[in-house]
Amino acid sequence: MEGMTRRGVQWLSAAADDPETCRARWADDPRTPCMLPAGRYFDVVTVDQRIGLEAFDQLVRREMPLGPVLVDHHARRVGFFLNSRWQERFSELVRRTTDAPPPYKYLSEGSLVVVPGPLPMSGDRYQWLRAPLRRPEANPLRPAALATMLVAAADLIARVDHYGEQYPTPAAVASLARKGMVSDEQ
């Protein structure tokens, strides 16, 4: 978890209907979340927390293009910031990657996003996985990287969830062995 830089605060608060009030609230309490309209300076793709955390980890480890990323622990959602007006491009990239896309919400014009304050603390509902350091550059590879990793992460999570159905846990095998249903040599 990390905090925002001064330039990140300037960029993100500029999206507010009243940027000065937003910056003043954050100056009073840098942990305070703020509700900002999407579509003006950024759009946000939100996904289930498990998929989002895996996708975030893969994007970071592979040093792929990545903008700010937030997590809402209560709703169990992760939000990836993209440049505004990339919805069609992102959706098309997801469709090209898979016939069964993971569930996601694309928040753009007309949507509101609750963002963490500049310095959230451990245990806060809203936190930054990757805080904005400045205005993110418009990188056309970012939506492609995000679409690819969201699909891959969803596939990995689905495989992990089904692993137990195909391969019993050691405790299940031991229980069957005690009941004489499986020999100890298996």
Image (tube, grey):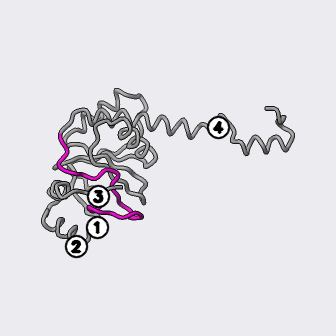
**Mark 4 → mark 2, Cα distance in angstroms:** 51 Å
The quadrant of the picture occupied by the C terminus is: top right
- Give the foreground label among 1 and 3: 3
What residue do we see at 36% from left, 32% from top? 148
Of residues 134 and 50, the one nearer the viewer is 134
**Mark 4 → mark 1, Cα distance in angstroms:** 43 Å
Q: Quadrant of residue 9?
A: bottom left
Task: State the extent of the magenta-drawn residues as a range.
Answer: 116-137
Secondary element type, mark 1: loop
Report the amino acid beneath label 4: Glu
Q: Which sits earlier in the primary sequence, circle 3 or circle 2? A: 3
Report the amino acid beneath label 2: Asp
Residue 171 placement (x, y as % from top left): 73, 45
Q: Which labelled disc corresponds to residue 165? A: 4
Q: Marks 2 and 1: in contact by CB < 8 Å?
A: yes
Rendered view: 184 above or below 118: above
Q: Callout 4 environment at 10 Å: few (<14), some (14 to 19), or many (20+)? A: few
Residue 100 placement (x, y as % from top left): 43, 32
Q: Which labelled disc corresponds to residue 32? A: 1
What residue do we see at 22% from left, 51% from top? 133
Q: Which sits earlier in the primary sequence, circle 4 or circle 3? A: 3
- Give the foreground label among 3 and 2: 3
Secondary element type, mark 4: helix
Residue beneath disc 2: 28
Report the amino acid beneath label 3: Gly
Q: Callout 2 environment at 10 Å: few (<14), some (14 to 19), or many (20+)? A: few
Q: Residue furthest bottom?
A: 28
Residue beneath disc 3: 3
Q: Callout 3 environment at 10 Å: few (<14), some (14 to 19), or many (20+)? A: many
The quadrant of the picture occupied by the N terminus is: bottom left
